[in-house]
Image (tube, rainbow, N blue to C red):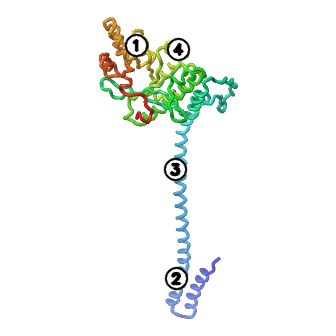
C-alpha cells in the first residue's frame, strides 16, 4: 500500500502541534498545519487525477462495449425477423422442390427420393430407339436446359396493342439449331418425353409471370398463356404437386392463364376436372383453344369452369359468322359477352383476313400478322 498519504498527514499534525509546543504564535502553527494539510490534499488530488484518467478510459471502453452490444442486439432482432420470413419462404421452396421433382425424374430417366419419402420402385429400362440421334438431342436438350421459351403476342382489336402472350417451347441442338415439334414430337410422345417438355414449359411460364409482375404497372393486366397438355394432366403425381405449388403462389393468378385444347377438355375425367377446379378456386383462369365447332360452345358452362377465353381460327370463325344468316354467331357472341368470356381469333396471317375478322367484334387477335413466336429476350 502507498504510505505517502499517511506521511503527509503525520507531517501536518507534527508541524501544527510542534509550533504550538515551542510557543510560536498559534497562527503560525495553524498556518503550518494548513500547509501540511494542503500538501496532503494535493497528493490525493494527483492520485485521484490518475484514477480519473483510468476511469475515463474505462468508461470509454464501456461505451464502445455498449455500442457493440447494441449493434449485436439489433443484428439478432433483424435475424429473428428475417427467419420469420424465411420460414414461410422455406415452406414455399419445399413445395416447389416437390413440384420440380417430377420434372427432374423425367429429365434424368431415374426416380429420385426426397428426405422422408419411401423409395420408388426401379423404372424398367427403355429399349434401344430407332431414331437415336433425334432422341439424344431432345434428351440432352432437356438435361442441359436447351428447351427455350418462345412468346407470341395476343393483341387487342382493333388497336393491335400487345396485351397477352402465349408460350411455346422450342428444342435447341448443341450447335444452336432450333428443332421444331414436327421433327421430334412423334418420338417424344412414343418414349414419354412430351410430359417433360410440357412441364418445363409450365415452370418457365411461372417464372415469366413473376418477371411480369415485377414490372409493377407495366405488367398489370398482361396474361401469360401456358398450355396444359393431356400428358401433363395424365401425370397425376406431377399435376397434384403442381396444383399444390399453385395454391401457395396464388398471387400469380391475375397474370397466368392455363390453356387446354377443346378436344382435350371434352375428354377430361372427373378427377382431372376436380384438379382444374382447385386451380380455379385459387383464382386461376383457363383458355380453350383449337375449337372445332364454334356452334357447340356453351358460354355459360365455360364460365362456370373458369374459362375466360376461347380461341378459334380466323377462317373457321369467319365461315361460322356467315353461315345461316349469322344467327348462330350472333347468339354465341352475345352469350360470350354475358358470360364475360373473351373471343381470341388466331391464325390471322394477312391484312385481308384481319379486315374480315374485325367484322366479328372479337376482343383479341393472334397470328403472324402481329408477330411470330420469338425467344423471350426478343419478345420484351
Residue at label 1?
A: 299
Residue at label 3?
A: 74
Picture residue at 59% right of the left edge, 80% below the top: 5
**Position of residue 323 measured from the top left corner of the image (x, y, whole percent):** 34, 7
Q: Earlier in the sequence, mark 2 or mark 1?
A: 2
**Front-lying residue, 54 or 356:** 356
User: Left or right: where does residue 39 sit relative to residue 257?
Assistant: right
**212 to 237, vertically: above or below:** below
**Position of residue 237 measured from the top left corner of the image (x, y, whole percent):** 60, 23
| Total numbered labels placed on residues in the image | 4
Residue 38 is labelled as 2
Residue 268 is labelled as 4
Measured in 3D between alpha carbons, the distance from the residue under mark 1 to the one under mark 4, in whole angstroms, is 18 Å
The quadrant of the picture occupied by the N terminus is: bottom right
Measured in 3D between alpha carbons, the distance from the residue under mark 3 to the one under mark 2, in whole angstroms, is 52 Å
Which tag is nearer the camera, tag 2 or tag 4?
A: 4
User: Left or right: where does residue 142 sit relative to residue 328?
Assistant: right
Answer whether labels 2 and 1 touch (C-beta < 8 Å): no
Q: Quadrant of residue 143?
A: top right
**Position of residue 225 measured from the top left corner of the image (x, y, whole percent):** 44, 25
Q: Earlier in the sequence, mark 3 or mark 2?
A: 2
User: At numbered mark 4, what does the secondary structure look like: helix, strand or loop?
Assistant: loop
Q: Earlier in the sequence, mark 1 or mark 4?
A: 4
Q: Earlier in the sequence, mark 1 or mark 3?
A: 3
Which tag is nearer the camera, tag 1 or tag 3?
A: 1
Measured in 3D between alpha carbons, the distance from the residue under mark 2 to the one under mark 4, in whole angstroms, is 108 Å
Q: Earlier in the sequence, mark 2 or mark 4?
A: 2
**Front-lying residue, 249 or 364:** 364
Q: Residues within 10 Å of mark 3 (few under 14, many from 20)?
A: few
Amino acid at each position: 500500500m502507498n504510505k505517502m498519504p499517511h506521511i503527509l498527514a503525520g507531517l501536518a499534525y507534527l508541524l501544527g502541534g510542534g509550533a504550538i509546543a515551542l510557543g510560536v504564535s498559534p497562527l503560525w502553527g495553524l498556518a503550518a498545519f494548513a500547509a501540511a494539510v494542503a500538501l496532503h490534499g494535493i497528493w490525493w488530488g494527483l492520485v485521484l487525477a490518475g484514477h480519473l484518467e483510468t476511469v475515463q478510459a474505462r468508461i470509454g471502453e464501456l461505451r464502445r462495449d455498449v455500442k457493440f452490444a447494441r449493434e449485436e442486439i439489433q443484428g439478432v432482432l433483424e435475424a429473428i425477423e428475417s427467419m420469420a420470413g424465411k420460414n414461410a419462404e422455406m415452406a414455399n421452396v419445399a413445395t416447389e422442390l416437390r413440384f420440380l421433382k417430377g420434372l427432374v425424374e423425367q429429365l434424368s430417366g431415374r426416380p429420385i427420393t426426397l428426405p422422408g419419402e419411401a423409395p420408388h420402385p426401379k423404372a424398367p429400362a427403355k429399349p434401344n430407339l430407332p431414331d437415336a440421334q433425334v432422341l439424344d438431342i431432345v434428351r440432352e436438350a432437356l438435361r442441359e436446359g436447351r428447351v427455350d421459351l418462345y412468346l407470341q403476342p395476343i393483341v387487342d382489336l382493333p388497336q393491335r396493342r400487345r396485351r397477352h402472350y402465349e408460350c411455346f417451347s422450342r428444342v435447341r441442338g448443341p450447335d444452336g439449331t432450333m428443332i421444331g415439334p414436327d421433327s421430334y414430337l412423334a418420338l417424344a410422345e412414343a418414349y414419354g418425353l412430351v410430359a417433360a417438355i410440357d412441364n418445363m414449359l409450365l415452370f418457365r411460364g411461372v417464372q415469366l409471370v413473376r418477371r411480369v409482375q415485377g414490372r409493377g404497372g407495366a405488367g398489370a393486366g398482361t396474361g401469360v398463356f401456358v398450355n396444359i397438355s393431356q400428358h401433363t394432366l395424365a401425370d397425376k403425381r406431377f399435376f397434384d404437386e403442381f396444383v399444390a405449388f399453385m395454391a401457395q403462389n396464388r398471387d400469380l393468378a391475375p397474370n397466368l392463364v392455363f390453356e387446354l385444347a377443346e378436344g382435350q377438355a371434352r375428354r377430361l375425367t372427373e378427377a382431372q376436372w376436380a384438379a382444374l377446379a382447385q386451380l380455379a378456386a385459387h383464382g386461376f383462369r383457363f383458355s380453350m383453344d383449337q375449337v372445332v365447332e364454334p356452334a357447340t360452345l356453351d358460354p355459360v358452362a365455360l364460365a362456370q369452369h373458369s374459362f375466360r377465353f376461347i380461341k378459334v381460327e380466323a377462317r373457321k370463325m369467319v365461315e361460322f359468322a356467315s353461315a345461316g344468316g349469322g344467327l348462330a354467331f350472333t347468339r354465341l357472341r352475345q352469350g360470350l359477352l354475358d358470360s364475360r368470356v373473351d373471343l381470341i381469333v388466331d391464325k390471322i396471317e394477312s391484312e385481308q383476313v384481319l379486315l374480315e375478322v374485325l367484322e366479328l367484334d372479337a376482343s383479341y387477335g393472334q397470328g403472324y400478322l402481329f408477330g411470330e413466336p420469338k425467344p423471350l429476350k426478343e419478345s420484351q
